[in-house]
Amino acid sequence: MTVETRLRVRYAETDQMGIVYHANYFVWMEMGRVEYCRAAGVRYRDMEEHDGILLTVAEVECRFLHPARYDDEVVVETAVSKAHPRLVSFVYRIHRSGEDVLLARGETTHVFCDRTLQRRKLPAKYWPAFGIAGPQGN
């Protein structure tokens, strides 16, 4: 499953050169990740509040290919690239709406942890949302 998240570049997201500041791409990836989870039937908030599961960032990568600028409509395509009960990796493709030019591509890897940041196994009830095969239910 690939989920598209659309956003409009705000002036505050650009640098002195009028180009989106690189750190904002990581914020956009997070937006894409949250929307991916929501589309898969999982809310981050519920995992945290009801099950005490946090998705801690273990690794992040981004390759910048073309600049985004103020007022561009940007699309973040998000998909799970790999997942198992201990971690999940997402891939991102970021482009201007209506254009086939890739602005950036990236990947984030997350370890499932509890509130004390100790690694935990993701409860099986969330496995289908991340494409993890195995027992379903509680």
Image (cartoon, rainbow, N blue to C red):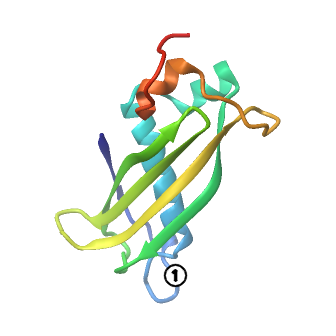
Q: Image check: 92 left or right of 13?
A: left
Q: Quadrant of residue 51?
A: top right
Residue wearing tag 1? 15
Q: Secondary structure beneath disc 1?
A: loop
Question: Which residue is painted at 50% across and 10% down in the image?
Answer: 137
> Up-down: is 56 above or below 121?
below
Q: Residue furthest bottom?
A: 17
In which quarter of the view is residue 35 placed? top left
Quarter that holds the N terminus:
top left
Foreground residue, 109 or 22? Answer: 109
State the image coordinates of residue 136 (x, y, percent, origin top left). 47, 14
User: In the rendered view, does 47 fall on the left or right side of 62?
Assistant: right
Residue type (three-letter) at the residue carrying disc 1: Asp
Q: Please state the horizontal and vertical placement of residue 109, each as a whole percent of the image.
A: 56, 52
| Residue at 42 percent of width and 49 percent of height | 32
User: Residue 68, position in %: x, y?
Assistant: 36, 75
Q: Is residue 127 above or below residue 27?
A: above
Residue 110: x and y, percent? Answer: 60, 47
Q: Give the camera-side residue of 2 and 6.
A: 2
- Check the picture and name the quadrant holding the C terminus: top right
Question: Residue at 52% of width from left, 87% of height from top?
Answer: 16
Q: Residue at x 46, y 21 (%)?
A: 134
Which residue sits furthest top? 138
> Quick one: 75 or 131, which is closer to the camera?
131
Q: Residue furthest front?
A: 134
Number of numbered discs? 1
